[in-house]
Amino acid sequence: MSTFQTAPRDDLAAAADLAEAYRRMRAEIAKVVIGQDEVVEQLLIGLFARGHVLLVGVPGLAKTLLVATVARILSLTFRRIQFTPDMMPSDITGTDILQDDPETGRRKFTFIPGPLFAHIVLADEINRTPPKTQAALLEAMQERHVTAAGRSYPLPDPFFVLATQNPIEQEGTYPLPEAQLDRFMLNVRVPYPSAAEELEILTRTTGEEGETPSVTLSAAQITAFQKLVRRVPAAEYVFTYARDLVRASRPDEAEATEYVRKFVSWGAGPRAGQSLILCAKARALLEGRVHATIDDIRHVAAPVLRHRVMTTFHAEAEGVVPDRVVEHLLAAIPAPTERAAGRLIKA
């Protein structure tokens, strides 16, 4: 039986509102950030899918500027944490300090929130801090609260972490283990700009100060749109295709190809399938559609799967990187059509 259902009328109106808001957001971001269209799209997909994003790129590609601009146009609180080797977990989560109570004259412990208590947190160079501090951040990302002295403190809603890694400088770093990388919904590669974009960067950033972006959405609206993403319908075969992609990435599964068995040591887990579906739903809404499709799954496959596929030493010797494995999966795993599945999607 198909799991597909049409969206209710209220959701159709909300979807139209989100598509229009997305158009305005792109226009406002473009006032500050030149190019990086795919990066902007994937970052906003992660935001509305209620996930966290890992940004990988060399210094100077406007990663911090992009994140700060997104926080500004969404009227969200923003904190940047520069990770260093001497940083402790309490430096980011907060700590209890002993203070005098002016009413009673007695001393008591008071929790002082750390920089994690913001709607958008930029964890700059996350691989430069020790595993203990990385684990504190990732626990907060998963649980969406911080625990100190046995008490739990909820983080703001929405809560969105964007972490950055520098792929070219690995000395003195603490690479994230595979299990912790899986906590990030998307791994977004930030490329160099094109020649035309780089020329525009030079001309716009070396003259008079540019335009200031305007606020487009509030925190309450973002939370409502995140809930809307969960309600986006999809045909059963869309779920099946996401499952097949994920299972084919595991070398021990029957669905794996010889290519995967040769070059992959560890494939993606069930959380990858969940991320594929949620990101596909978010992308559909941002494009003004009220149902997720196979094309949406394929569009988000690379940023969802690239950090969840571990290649072998043989793959490294032959230059086979996770992105090539994802390309192989998209070419090797047949995508069912609406007609083949025997179901017709209705908007």
Image (cartoon, helix red, strand yellow):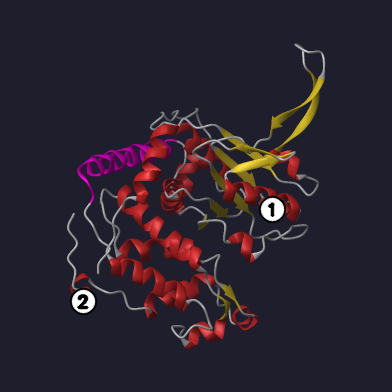
Q: Quadrant of residue 24?
A: top left
Residue drawn at x 57%, y 61% as measured from the top left: 182
Residue drawn at x 53%, y 83% as measured from the top left: 252
Disc 1 from disc 2: Cα separation: 45 Å
Q: Residues within 10 Å of mark 1 (few under 14, many from 20)?
A: some
Q: Is residue 62 visible?
A: no
Q: Which mark is residue 135?
A: 1
Q: Main secondary structure of the magenta part?
A: helix
Q: Amino acid at mark 2?
A: Ala
219 versus 327 height, above or below: above
Return the x and y of residue 251 as percentages of the image width and height: 53, 82
Q: Is residue 168 left or right of residue 16?
A: right
**Tag 1's secondary structure?**
helix
Q: Amino acid at mark 1?
A: Ala
Q: Is residue 126 left or right of residue 23?
A: right
Q: Nearer the viewer, residue 18 or 84?
A: 18
Task: Give the quarter of the figure containing the C terminus.
Answer: bottom left
Q: Nearer the viewer, residue 69 or 107?
A: 107
Segment colored magenta: 7-31
State yes or no: residue 297 in magenta.
Answer: no
Q: Nearer the viewer, residue 196 or 37?
A: 37
Q: Which mark is residue 340?
A: 2
Return the x and y of residue 247 as percentages of the image width and height: 46, 76
Return the x and y of residue 203 as percentages of the image width and height: 48, 38
